[in-house]
Image (cartoon, rainbow, N blue to C red):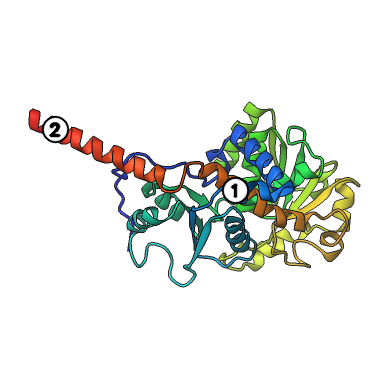
């Protein structure tokens, strides 16, 4: 079953976060500051989303994303409902448009973890409550927020940060690249030529970096990571992607081992969004070393997402959607009266 292709008829769409550019520099900084405050004093936010509800639509399995959103919403005083779509993808049983228009009547926000980014775009187009990308094949903005929170905790200033992503230029790479470009960081994607980030997203990020004072570059040499503040790795084959012996072979020289970290330098951190395929993209000697902050990143998913939810759900429960419905009805009545008068 497909989603109607027509433009949504109703005005008043909520603020959606499908990629880092949906937030922008000021909003990202505010979210990160709030995340740090929540982490320091969790009780300060314990009732901030009392009475609010979150629906989680997951087409892919998850540990960190599901647990951090469910427990996070509970800590904020709200409720999270998990809907398992691993067997039946969104849009098959009923249109995504109808699905979104049902959900907005019950919940205050929608979190989607999906195979195709277009699914999130369709949900956002038809929903008047916020839609949050919890992973698609193109972007993973919630992960990038947690990652930059972790870097700041480790004393790295985003405006002077040098971050290298080593391996496959995937969704995590692209969200990190966007966030770095927005905040004025230096970002280096170290990949085989066949695994570069999406050319259009790369061009957009270079444009963002030119305005923010940052830099976005690509390299096919592991030697180019010399002097970076952090080395980031991720799975060579993304979840749901067909396995490829040729791709694995191309990525073999990009495994992060002790030598790679020596090239990066003694103060370089190691980062990974997890789950890690130990022995493939990273060795135990690195991920279990003092340089590794991977479990700090995992913990910070909770705090960064809670700060994001607080930002998006700033109005009392259900009032925002009700106000929009009243405006829509008022607009319809005005249009009807105008038609009669004419």
Query: At which x and y percent is residue 45?
Result: 63, 47
Q: Quadrant of the C terminus?
A: top left
Q: At 57% from the left edge and 56% from the top edge, which residue is drawn?
A: 73
In this view, the residue in front, 99 or 53, is 53
Q: At 78% from the left edge and 59% from the top edge, which residue is drawn?
A: 255
Residue that badge 1 annotates: 141
Q: Residue farthest to the bottom?
A: 87
- Residue 225's quadrant in the figure? top right
Residue that badge 2 annotates: 337
Query: At which x and y percent is residue 243?
Result: 61, 68
- Residue 206's quadrant in the figure? top right
Q: Is residue 323 left or right of residue 159?
A: left
Q: Is residue 139 above or below residue 89?
A: above
Q: Is residue 174 visible?
A: no
Kindly state the secondary structure of the residue where label 1 is placed.
helix
Q: Quadrant of the N terminus?
A: bottom left
Query: At which x and y percent is residue 92?
Result: 37, 66
In this view, the residue in front, 302 or 323, is 323
Q: At 33% from the left edge and 56% from the top edge, which residue is drawn?
A: 3
Q: Is residue 62 above or below residue 195?
A: below
């Amino acid at each position: 079953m497909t989603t109607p292709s027509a433009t949504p008829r109703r005005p008043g769409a909520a603020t959606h976060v499908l990629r880092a550019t949906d937030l922008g520099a000021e909003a990202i900084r505010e979210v990160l500051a709030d995340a740090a405050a929540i982490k320091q004093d969790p009780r300060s936010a314990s009732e901030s989303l009392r009475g609010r509800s979150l629906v989680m639509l997951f087409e892919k399995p998850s540990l960190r994303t599901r647990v951090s959103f469910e427990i996070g919403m509970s800590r904020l005083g709200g409720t999270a409902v998990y809907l398992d779509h691993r067997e039946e993808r969104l849009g098959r049983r009923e249109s995504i448009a109808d699905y979104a228009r049902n959900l907005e009547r019950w919940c205050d926000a929608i979190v989607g973890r999906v195979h195709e980014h277009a699914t999130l775009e369709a949900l956002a187009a038809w929903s008047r409550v916020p839609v949050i990308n919890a992973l698609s094949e193109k972007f993973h903005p919630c992960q990038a927020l947690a990652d930059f929170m972790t870097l700041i905790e480790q004393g790295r200033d985003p405006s002077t940060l040098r971050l290298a992503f080593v391996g496959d230029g995937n969704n995590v790479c692209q969200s990190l690249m966007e966030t770095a470009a927005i905040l004025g960081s230096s970002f280096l994607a170290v990949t085989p030529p066949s695994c570069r980030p999406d050319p259009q997203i790369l061009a957009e990020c270079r444009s963002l970096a030119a305005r923010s004072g940052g830099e976005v570059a690509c390299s096919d040499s592991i030697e180019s990571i010399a002097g970076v503040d952090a080395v980031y790795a991720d799975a060579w084959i993304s979840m749901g992607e067909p396995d490829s012996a040729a791709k694995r072979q191309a990525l073999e020289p990009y495994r992060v081992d002790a030598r790679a970290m020596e090239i990066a330098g003694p103060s370089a951190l190691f980062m990974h969004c997890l789950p890690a395929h130990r022995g493939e993209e990273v060795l135990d000697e690195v991920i279990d070393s003092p340089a590794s902050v991977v479990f700090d990143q995992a913990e910070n998913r909770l705090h960064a997402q809670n700060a994001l939810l607080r930002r998006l759900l700033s109005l009392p429960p259900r009032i925002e959607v009700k106000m929009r419905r009243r405006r829509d009805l008022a607009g319809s009545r005005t249009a009807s009266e105008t038609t009669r008068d004419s």
